[in-house]
Amino acid sequence: MMNYLERYKPDKTFEKFKVRVLNRGDKQIYTGETEGPVTRVESLLMLLSIAAHENFTIFKVDVGSAFMRTPMVDDVKHKWVKLDKLVVKVLQELEPGKYEPYLLQDGSVIVKKKKISYGYVEASHYWYKDLSDTFFSAGYNQSKKDKCAFIQKEGGNVACCATTVDDCLFVTSNDETWIQKQIEFLKVKYDDISVEMGDEIGLIGMQVKMDRFNKRVILTQPKMLKKSLLPLEWIKVLLLLHWAM
C-alpha cells in the first residue's frame, strides 16, 4: 500500500511531503523478532540537561529511508511481496518498460525484497540492530541503563547519542573536528542523512531551545497544544451554554 502525508516541524512550519510504499504487516502469517526499542524520555532530558550545564553542542542526525537500508535476514519469512497496480503504475513512469514482462492480469507485480523496508513487523527490530552495530563499530559503548543511548570518549572529548528510531540526538564537546567525526561515520554507512544543528531543533514532536545564558532547556509542543486545546469558538459556545443553564 502507499502512504502519503504532509510533514510539519514541531514549531508548525511545513517540512516536506512524505510518500512511502508500505508492506502489509497486518497480512503477515509468520513473524520473527519484533522488539524495536527507542531511547527513554528520561535519557533525552538528561542529555539535554548535560548539554545546558556543560555548554555542550547539540545536533540531530536523521537517517533517510532508514528501514529500507536494513538488509534482509532469514528471520523474515515473507520475502515475496505483491505490489498493487497503483504502485506499479508509478514505477512504470519512473522506469518505462522495466516492469512490463512481469505484469499480472490485474496490473500488479510480485517481487522479492532485498531489504526489510517499511511495514514489516520485524522492521524496527532489525533497523535497531543495524544502527547499534554502526555505533559499536565507531567506538561507542552502550549505556547500561538505556540500550538506545551510546557514549564515546577520546582524549578530552566526549560524545553522547540517544536514538529514536532513525533520529539521533547528539550531545558533544565543542570541538568542530570531533563533531564532524560523529556525523561522518553515519554518513559513510547510510549516505542519505540530514543534520539539524544549532540551539533550536525539533525532536520527537518537541521544539528544543537551549537557553545558554541561564543554563536551561526550553521544551515546547505547539502542535500537540493545537490538537489538545479546544478552538476559541467552541470555548465561547460552551461558556454560553453554561450561563444559559
Image (cartoon, rainbow, N blue to C red):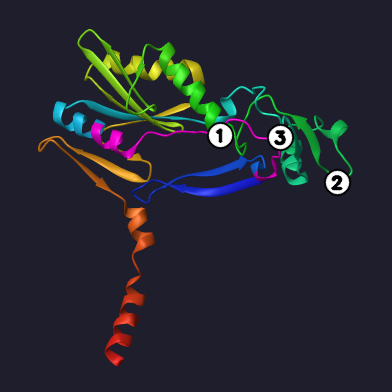
Q: Nearer the viewer, mark 1 or mark 3?
A: 1
User: Relative to residue 91, is residue 192 depicted above or below?
Assistant: above
- Which residue in the protein does label 2 denote? 106
Helix, strand or loop under label 3: helix
Quadrant into which the C terminus falls: bottom left
Mark 3 surroundings within 10 Å by alpha-carbon count, few (fewer than 14), some (14 through 19), many (20 or more): few
Q: Compare residues 212 and 22 and report the one nearer the observer.
A: 22
How far is the residue under mark 2 from the one under mark 1?
A: 33 Å
User: Relative to residue 41, is residue 172 depicted above or below?
Assistant: above
User: Relative to residue 16, is residue 136 depicted above or below?
Assistant: above
Q: Main secondary structure of the magenta part?
A: loop
Q: Which of the 4 image quarters holds residue 185?
A: top left
Q: Which mark is residue 75?
A: none
Compared across the picture, whether 215 is left or right of 37 comes to left
N-terminal of the two: label 2 or label 3? 3
Q: Which mark is residue 94?
A: 3
- Residue 38 drawn in magenta: yes
- Which residue in the protein does label 1 denote? 34
How far is the residue under mark 2 from the one under mark 3?
A: 20 Å
Q: Amino acid at mark 1?
A: Thr
Q: Are marks 2 and 3 in contact (CB under 8 Å)?
A: no
Q: Nearer the viewer, mark 2 or mark 1?
A: 1
Q: Amino acid at mark 2?
A: Asp
Please provide the residue range marked out in magenta: 26-46
Q: Residue at x 30, y 92 (%)?
A: 244
Q: Residue at x 32, y 76 (%)?
A: 235
Helix, strand or loop under label 2: loop
Whether residue 12 is visible, yes or no, is: yes
Compared across the picture, whether 87 is left or right of 57 comes to right
Q: Nearer the viewer, mark 2 or mark 3?
A: 2
N-terminal of the two: label 2 or label 1? 1
Quadrant into which the N terminus falls: top right
